[in-house]
Image (cartoon, rainbow, N blue to C red):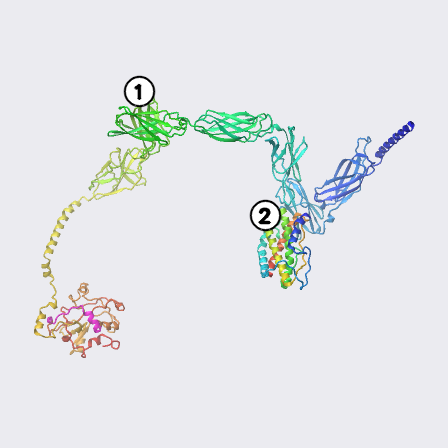
Amino acid sequence: MKVLAAGVVPLLLVLHWRHGAGSPLPITPVNATCAIRHPCHNNLMNQIRSQLAQLNGSANALFILYYTAQGEPFPNNLDKLCGPNVTDFPPFHANGTEKARLVELYRIVVYLGTALGNITRDQKILNPSALSLHSKLNATADILRGLLSNVLCRLCSKYHVAHVDVTYSPDTSGKDVFQKKKLGCQLLGKYKQVIGMLAQAF
Amino acid sequence: MALSEVFQTTFFLTLLSLRTYQSEVLAEHLPLTPVSLNVSSNSAHQSLHLQWTVQNLLYHQELKMVFQIQISRIETSNVIWVGNYSTTVKWNQVLHWSWESELPLECATHFVRIKSAVDDARFHEPNFWSNWSSWEEVNVQDSLGQDILFVFPKDKLVEEGANVTICYVSRNIQNNVSCYWEGKQIYGEQLDPHVSVFHLSSVPFIRKTGADVYCEVSQGSVSKGIKGIVLFVSKVLEEPKDFSCETQDFKTLHCTWDPGVDTALGWSKQPSQSYTLFESFSGEKKLCTHKNWCNWQITQDSQETYNLTLIAENYLRKRSVNILFNLTHRVYPMNPFSVNFENVNATNAKMTWKVHSMKKDFTYLCQIELYGEGKMMQYNVSIKVNGEYFLSELEPATEYMAQVRCADASHFRKWSQWSGQNFTTLEAAPSEAPDVWRNVNSEPGSHIVTLFWKPLSKWHAKGKILFYNVVVENLDKLSRPELHSVPAPAKITKLTLDQRSYRIWVTASNSVGTSPASVIVISADPENQEVEEERIADTEGGFSLSWKPQPGDVVGYVVDWCDHPQYTLCDLQWKNVGPNATSTVISTDAFRPGVRYNFRIYGLSTKRIACLLEKKTGYSQELAPSDNPHVLVDKLTSHSFTLSWKYYSTESQPGFIQGYHVYLKSKARQCHPRFEKAILSDGSECCKYKIDNPEEKALIVDNLKPKSFYEFFVTPFTSAGEGPNATFTKVTTPDEHSSMLIYILLPMFFCFLLIMIVCYLKSQWIKETCYPDIPDPYKSSILSLIKFKEKPHLTIMNVSDCIPDAIEVVSKPEGTKIQFRKSLTETELTKPNYLYLLPTEKNYSGPGPFICFENLTYNQAASDSGSCGHVPVPLKLPPSQLGLMISPENVQKALEKNYMNSLGEISAGETSLNYVSQLALPMSGDKDSLPTNPVEPPHCSEYKRQMAVPLCLASPSPTENTSLSSITLLNPGEHYH
C-alpha cells in the first residue's frame, strides 16, 4: 500500500489534477460547459500530432532499453514475455470522428500514464542503477501528461466534453518481481504498437 | 481460643497435603494431550506455523514437556519430518512452533500432527506419550487461482552456495512444461501429475537484481505462455576484518574494520549489511552509520578495560568479531604541533614542539628525524607536554628539515603522524683556500697571466661566496701589492704583468669571513716551451700520465689540460698531484672520442713557481679522419702528373694521421710500380699506394700512358681507419703528338691571315675585275642624248604601260625548240602573238612544258634558288585572283619595283623573244590565294636575252582592239575585259 501511495496515486492526481478528478468520469452532454483554468492554444491539434510523433519516435528505444535492463530471458523471448497482450487496454478506432478519436485517445493516454507510473516505480526499486531507463521513462511520462492536457483542452473547447470514463492499468504492487517485469514489458510493447497507430490516425 | 487456632492450622495442613496429592495423581494418571492444533502457512518464508494448547494442566501448574511433531507431504503416510520440541508448559498456554519447508508449500499438501509427554524431573515414573492429535492439512494450492501454470517460490532470498528447490504447478497435465535457470534448461522430478520439482544446488551470486527462473508451458509446439520467478542470491556475509579501536584523547574510541563485500540486493530485497558495536562490560550498544568505522564515546574514566564486539548483520546471517583491550594500550597520539627552531647558528639549533595533553602523568616518547646534506639523523626524547631538543654538529649555511612524531612512552602502540619544519643554519668563514692555477702567455715585454680557480665546495665555502680577492705582489721591486676583487661566481681573471716575478694570493670571501690564501708565483723567466710533446693513449677510460721527477724540492705537481680543446674557451682543467708522485691518471666524463687532448705537467717548487716538465697529447679514442684532403693535380704530362695536398691539416683530425692512401683507377689491368691492387668497398678494383709519412703531402704518379683516362682518390688514415669515401677525381693525360700539331697549324694560320689582308687591300680591283656594277639607266649618258634630239616618245619605259606576263613573238623564228609556238603562228601570223606564262584554270592540266627566263637583274634571289629563276607559283589560281592580279592597278603595283630596260638597248627587227614583264607573286596578304598544290618545277627552256618592250612599240594601244592577252588569259564570262 505504501508503494501504491508513493507511485500510482500521485501520478493519477497529477494526471487528473482538475477539481473532481480521481474517479472515472462520465461523458458530459455536448452542450455542457467545460471549466478550464487555462486557455487552450489555437493549434491544439498540431501540438497533439507533434506530441504523438515525439512519443512514436522514442517508443521503440524505450522498449529496447526496458527489456535489455531486465536481463534474461526477456531479450530472447520478446514474443512470449513482451507481446502486447494487454487485455483491458482501451480500444481505438481510427475511422471514427475526431471527437470519438480524441475521447479514445484520452482513455489510452490515461491508461498509459498509470502504466508508466507503475513501471517507473518498479524499475527504480528493481534496477536502481539503470539511470538511462529511468530517465527515458520519466521523459515519456512528461510528454504523456502534456498530451493529456492538450487532448482535454481540445475535447472541452471544441466538443464541450469535460468528463471521460477512463480505466487504469492494473496495479502491480502486489505482484512478484517476475510478473512486474513481464507486465512492464508487455505494456511497453503495447505502448509501442498503439502509439504508432495513434500517430498515424492523427 | 488457642484450641480453635490449632484446629484451623491442622485443617489447612491437611487440606494442602490433600491438594498436593491430588495434583500428583492427576499428573500421573490424566494424559496431558495437545489440543486445538492449528496449522497456518507462510508462503514467503515457506514455513508452517503450529499453535496448540495442552489439555488437563492444573491451574498455575508448570510442567516441562516434550512434543513430538510429524509432518507428511501429499498424503499422511508420507512422513517427511519427525521431531521433538521441548518446553515448559503453563496452564492454558498457547504453544507456537514453526517449521520451514525446503519445498514451496504451494506445490504439495502438507499434514501435521502432534503428541506430547511429560519430561519433568519431579515425576519419577516413566513418561508415556499422549495420543497423536488428528492430522491437520495444509493445502495452499487451492488458493492459487485458475492460471495454467505457477512457479514457486516467488522472490526467494537465499545465500550464495545454498540449495534451492523450485517447483511448478501445471493445471493441465496435457501441457508440456520446460523450465530454465538463467537461460539453461533444468530438469526435475515429478511430484505428481501436476507438480514437478527442481533442485538447484549451490546457487551462485549472479547479479544484485536477481536471477530469473522461468518455465514455458506449451501444447505441442504451441507456446501457451511463460511464467517465472526471480531468485535473489545474496553474497555470503563476511566477518569484519582488521577490527581495531584506538583513542587519541581518552574521550573517543575510534574503531575501524574492513567490511568485506556488500551484500545489498536490488528490489530492496536486502539492504547492505548493518554494523553494531556492543560493549559487554557496560552493556551498551551502538548502531554504526558507516560501513567501515564507528566512534565509541568513552564516558567513564574509571573503565580501563573494554570488550567490544562488532556485529555485522544482514537478512540471512550475522557475523561478529570481538576485541578485549585496556584503553591505555590503545593510544594513538595526535600529531605534535608548533614545531619551531630557536637559537639557530652556524652549527647548532634548538628544536621545540608541543603535544596534545592526554591525561595526568602521561609521558610521550618522541622521535626526531633531521634531514640535511643528503643524510638523515634520528634522535629519541621523552617529554610530558612541551618538547625540545638541541641539534648540534650542523653544517653552516645548510638547509635542514626536522620532523617529530610521538607515541605513548608507557605502552608503545603507534607513532603519531610526522610534524616537521625546515630551517637553515648560519654561514661561517670559508675553511679552505681556493684551488688556483694559472696560464701564462708571454708577450714582448709582458706576461699575460690568466688565473683560474675552482669554486669551493659547499663543505669548505660554509656559505655563499660573494667574491674572490686576488692580491698581486711584485717580488723584484718593492711596491704596494695590488688588490683585485672578482665577484663570484667568476672562476677566472686575467692579469697583465711585466716581465718580473710576482707572487699572487687568491682568497674567497663570504658574508662572514675570508678563506686562507692560495699562493702562486709567476716567474720572470718565460715558460720553457721547448719541451717535446709525447703521444699517449687512453687506457680504460682515462689518460695515464707519468713524468720524470723534477730535480730539487717540489711541493707538488700540476697537470693541466682543456676539456674542450676545440673551442676558444677550452675550459682549462688541472689536477694537483703530491710531491712524491710521478704519475697520475686523468679521467673525466668530458673526454670525447676523436678529440685531441694536450696535457702539460708542471712541477711546483717550494717557492710556488711552476715549471713545465712535460707535454703529452692523445685521444681518448681515435677515430678515422673526418675529411679527405683537397688534392691538386699539377704538372700534367702525357706520362705523369703530380698530386699534392699540402694544405691538409693533420692536427685537427680525430686521430693521429699515420699516412695517406692514394687510390688510382685506370683501364690498364696492371698496377703501376709502387702501387698494389686493392678492392674498394663497392667491389671495384683499383691500385693503391700507401704513404706512411703524414707530412708527405705530394705524390708523382708516373709511367702513365698518353691520352689515357685515370681516376685517383687520396684519403688519410689513422689507427681507426681511412677517411670517408669520396668520388674519384678524373685526369686525362694529353696526347704525345699534340705539340707537333701546334708547329703546323700556327704557320698555316699566319699564311691565311696574310692572304686575307692582301685580299682586303685589293678588293676594289677584284670587284671591278670579277663583277662590275650594272649601269643605272637614269644615270646613263643616253638620256642626255635623247633630250638633245627632242623626241618625247623616246623616254624611259613606264611600267604602267607594259602588258605583264606576255611574250611577244616579234617574228617567227626558223628553227624553234618550243612546241607551242607552232600553233600560235598558224592561227595568227599577222598579229603579235603573246605567250602566256601563267596557265588558266581550264587550259592547264598538270605539269607540262614550261618556259622560264633567266633574269638575274630582276630576281637575283630566285635565280639563286637553283630552279632556273622560276618561283613556284600556284598553278590553279581562282579566276578572281587572276583578275585581281591582272587588273591594271595591281599589275602596276606589282611592277613598281622592277626596273625597265631602256629602249636604247633594243635592237629593232631582231627575231627573238622579247620579255615584256614579270608578274610578281601574290602578296602575303592574300590568304586565299596561297598555293594548295605546289608543283614540282618542270623542265625549263632558257633564253639568253631579255629586254623590256614599251607598250607603245611592242603592242597596240590598250584602247585598240588588241586585248588578246586578257581574253586568252581569263575565262570569258567570269571576268571582265
Q: Return the residue at label 1.
A: B553
**Residue B523 picture location, percent across and down:** 28, 25
The image quadrant where one finds the C terminus of chain B is bottom left
**Residue B92 picture location, percent across and down:** 81, 38
**Crowding near pointer 2: few (<14 within 10 Å), some, many (20+)?**
few
Residue in front for this viewpoint, B900 or B662: B900
B22 versus B787 height, above or below: above
SS class of the residue under badge 1? loop
Residue found at the far top of this picture: B552
Judged left or right of residue A110, residue B469 is left
Q: Is the magenta stretch mostly helix, strand or loop?
A: helix
Residue B462 magenta-highlighted = no
Chain of the residue under label 2: A
The image quadrant where one finds the N terminus of chain B is top right
B829 versus B426 height, above or below: below
Q: Do labels 2 and 1 share a chain?
A: no
Instruction: Give the numbered dot on residue A131.
Output: 2
SS class of the residue under badge 2? helix
Chain of the residue under label 1: B
Q: Do the residues labelled 2 and 1 touch (CB within 8 Å)?
A: no
Instruction: Give the numbered dot on residue A184.
Output: none
Q: What stretch is highlighted in magenta?
A: B886-905
**Crowding near pointer 1: few (<14 within 10 Å), some, many (20+)?**
few
Label total for image: 2
Tag 2: residue type?
Answer: Leu
**Residue B636 picture location, percent across and down:** 20, 41
Tag 1: residue type?
Answer: Asp
